[in-house]
Amino acid sequence: MRSSTSRLRLLVTGLVAQHPRLGGVAWDYLQYLLGFASLGHDVYYLEDSGQWPYRLGARSAGRSRVARDPAANVAHLAKLMERFGLAERWAYRFPVTSTWFGLSQTARREITATADLLIDVSGALERPEQHRGRGRAVYIDTDPVFTQLKLAAGAREFAARVAAHDLHFSFGERVQGLAIPTPYRWRPTRQPVVLSEWQPGNRARKAFTTVLSWTSYAPLRFRGESYGQKDVEFRRFLSLPARAAPISLEVAIGGTRHADWEGDAAAPPPPEILRGAGFKVVDAYHVCADLDRYRSYVESSRGEWSIQKNGYVRGQPGWFSGRSACYLAAARPVVVQDTGLAGVLPTGDGLLTFGSVDEAEAGLREVDAHYERHAAAARALAAAYFDAELVLPTLLEEALASDA
């Protein structure tokens, strides 16, 4: 097994073409690619999720949102890769016709066969065993608690995909200690952030902001308990805008609704709920529609205030959002609902956590009153805990260790 300090051939997965209007999603995967490339590695991007891609202009739910012609999605991916010097280093499979774009079949197969590591971020590959070569396959769990719940529930297809990997890492740095049974050793890792891409000097607006989906999928149940989405937790904090006034709270949320997944399907649409509670609501499909608009939205914010998925709050896996890491990198303080971060990340300066409305209000007022100190601490936290030049070498070292 080669050393992590030698030049490695790395194959990184993602969902960039599938979600062309989600700038934050693109950053999640792109920062792996840019980080590995800046370390001198031979890096390639592979997207083969087996999922229908979404249309660039789609806003409504249902079949009209999916792309039956992938041309726009492929063009979006190609433009992004070319922008960052990766024009000849990507491959995408359109699942409906099983057509490949990007690298030629010969080049793709040669790269797959010779890659030192296959790094499957978010477990994005539909059939990871088809992309195995001489190196190890690494699973990066970006959705802790829910990943382990699906395994515990015996979801056979999902379990087979996870089992096709040699090593398993998780953004839930305490997930190994959860009561949910798991057959794997989940090694802690974090979202890498390329600090040079996030500028702390830009002028900030007065609003604390966040970007979210009301629900991402249906709640999961385990031993009689429900593990839900952000819609469950947000209802506990609807009084916060009035409590924290005159501090402004803004939410960027997409227009897609999955009413059958929500705890109260008869409730008004999420934007109406939020506006009625005093949050300012903006369209995430507009303000965060691409890499640059997403970054501008983060950098223009006074800081982030956000609740978490109910499953993260209930499970306490020590998870921290890649989105929040970008706020820190932009020197924007972060005030977020606690997911078991004690002992994982330092809190109190630049990063504050809460479990109740009182604590959320106190955190916002503390940051607002001592903003410059918290802003400087936020950037320092990003440099110490999320810098791609620190996170990625550690990941490689563990993945390549002879006893892994």
Image (tube, rainbow, N blue to C red):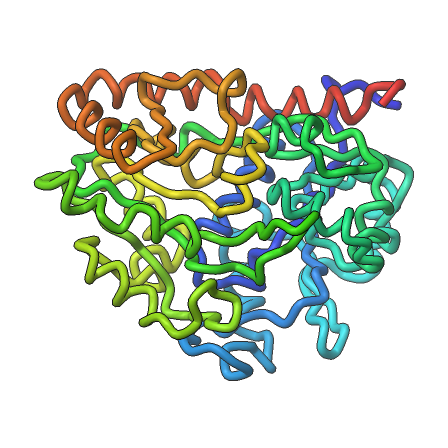
* Viewer-closest of 276 and 95: 276
Q: With respect to residue 26, does 364 lie above or below?
A: above
| Percent coordinates x, y for residue 141 in the rendering | 66, 41
| Percent coordinates x, y for residue 276 in the rendering | 19, 62
Q: Residue furthest front?
A: 224
Q: Residue furthest right?
A: 134
Horizontal side of 171 relative to 373 (left or right) equals right
- Residue drawn at x 30%, y 39% as measured from the top left: 305
Image quadrant holding the N terminus, namely top right
Image quadrant holding the C terminus, namely top right
Q: Quadrant of residue 300?
A: top left
Q: With respect to residue 316, does 284 lie above or below?
A: below
- Residue drawn at x 56%, y 61% as measured from the top left: 217
| Percent coordinates x, y for residue 68 in the rendering | 60, 82
- Residue drawn at x 27%, y 18% as measured from the top left: 376
Q: Quadrant of residue 35?
A: top right
| Percent coordinates x, y for residue 366 in the rendering | 20, 23
Horizontal side of 199 relative to 144 (left or right) equals left
Q: Quadrant of residue 50?
A: bottom right
Q: Is residue 37 visible?
A: no
Q: Residue furthest left?
A: 246
